[in-house]
Image: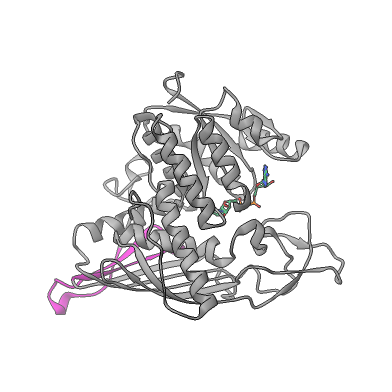
Amino acid sequence: MSSHDSILRVGMVGYAFMGAAHSQAWRTVNRVFDLPARVRMALVCGRDEPKVAEAADRLGWDGYTTDWRRLVESDEIDVVDICTPGDSHREIALAALAAGKHVLCEKPLANSVAEAREMTEAAARARESGVRAMCGFNYRRVPAVALMRQLVADGRIGEIRHVRATYLQDWIVDPQFPLVWRLQKDRAGSGALGDIGAHIIDLTQYVTGQLVTGVSALTETFVRQRPLVAGSSGLAAQADGNGSATGQVTVDDAAVFVARLDGGALATYEATRFATGRKNALRVEINGSRGSVVFDLERLNELEFLDATRPAAEQGFSRILVTEPDHPYLGAWWPPGHIIGYEHSFTHQARDFVEAVATGADPAPSFADALQVQLVLDAVTRSAERAAWTEVEPALAEASA
Ligand SMILES: NC(=O)c1ccc[n+]([C@@H]2O[C@H](COP(=O)([O-])OP(=O)(O)OC[C@H]3O[C@@H](n4cnc5c(N)ncnc54)[C@H](O)[C@@H]3O)[C@@H](O)[C@H]2O)c1
């Protein structure tokens, strides 16, 4: 923390989808959780002045700037929150860490292993002077996911044999959907793989405590030419109306892979933007020697649990309603049964980050953890290119699930 003891002044770069989700979290976190520091939403950055001015007002930021370097170097900022596409994560994070700012960076950490490694090394150096860095894998903070991890850690699932993870979307099934930044390799690094595949890689490793060691993958780009984009570049973008102007899609539309985890489990992963009818369907199932557990984001207040140690006649999947005050994060929210939603995962992420920074603890997932996810993404890409089993390059020593 800075000399401004109990105030953490946040500067956020990017104010669209994730910018809005993070703003909501920064605004809410001290109202719900009792924390050793208070957040001040000091500065937001975007490149278009009228738009960033409007966003600052709407999202609740004290001020705005059109130059992220100004934000990063400002003496009025303690934390830099990076909510931009992957092609700018490295540059902004390195500058922020060099300026002694704590960094929260959206996932995937970077567009390549080389960038992620450089960022991880910079974070390790900055840590020596008390600077903290974390990557935003927010699904870890869904209470049912955190409970799933606890059940595994407590041995209730036993020895894990199978991990089955899917993250399914359908927002680009229409070939007329335009060429937004997420479909360009130089901006996004990869397609469904890095965007949503990264989430299920992190989530399964977090829940099981096991790391992916090798993969065999297939990737596909079903629609290779798309209309050039007009206006918004987000998930609800529209084509520019000039039917003849198209550009090349340079990322995967879908990635499927099998994997081995270092604790002996076999895993399957599917990440696609072509699962017609599936909007944001993230599901993870784990089967072990003593039981099974299932998380489905479309029912995020629930966890399905089967206890195989019970008499066979009484066995069956039970639905745990994850809203008890003893469940992770939920003591601060509503009475039991009063459910929460997507946005709460970001408030919980802000809670964990603020607490770590204010108490001088290491937040998780660290940049080293996110580098390890990047190494898995890289192995998947190489495996698909070579049509061969591919080992994941070992991460730095401090990476942990
Ligand atoms: N954790 C999650 O569940 C989740 C969900 C969606 C996106 N993401 C990640 O968040 C990041 C942003 O994605 P998004 O969906 O919010 O994208 P978006 O297109 O909705 O917003 C990107 C924002 O970055 C701004 N921007 C781009 N380049 C900039 C620059 N050089 N300087 C200043 N501002 C710049 C844009 O103006 C826009 O405000 C990506 O890394 C993405 O992978 C994470």
Identity of the residue drawn at 19% across and 75% down:
315
- Span colored in magenta: 290-319
Residue 293 painted magenta: yes
User: What's the image's color scheme?
Assistant: one colour
- Residue 91 shows up from this direction: yes
Q: Quadrant of residue 173?
A: bottom right
Residue 157 painted magenta: no
Residue 178 percent coordinates (x, y): 74, 65
Identity of the residue drawn at 60% across and 43% down:
91
Considering depth in this image, is 277 or 254 the residue closer to the camera? 254
- Residue 350 shows up from this direction: no
Residue 211 percent coordinates (x, y): 34, 62
Furthest residue to the left? 311
Q: Quadrant of residue 29?
A: top left
Identity of the residue drawn at 71% across and 38% down:
52
Identity of the residue drawn at 41% across and 49% down:
368
Rendered position, 64 above or below 389? above
- Looking at the rendering, in which quadrant would you find the N terminus? top left
Residue 360 percent coordinates (x, y): 35, 31
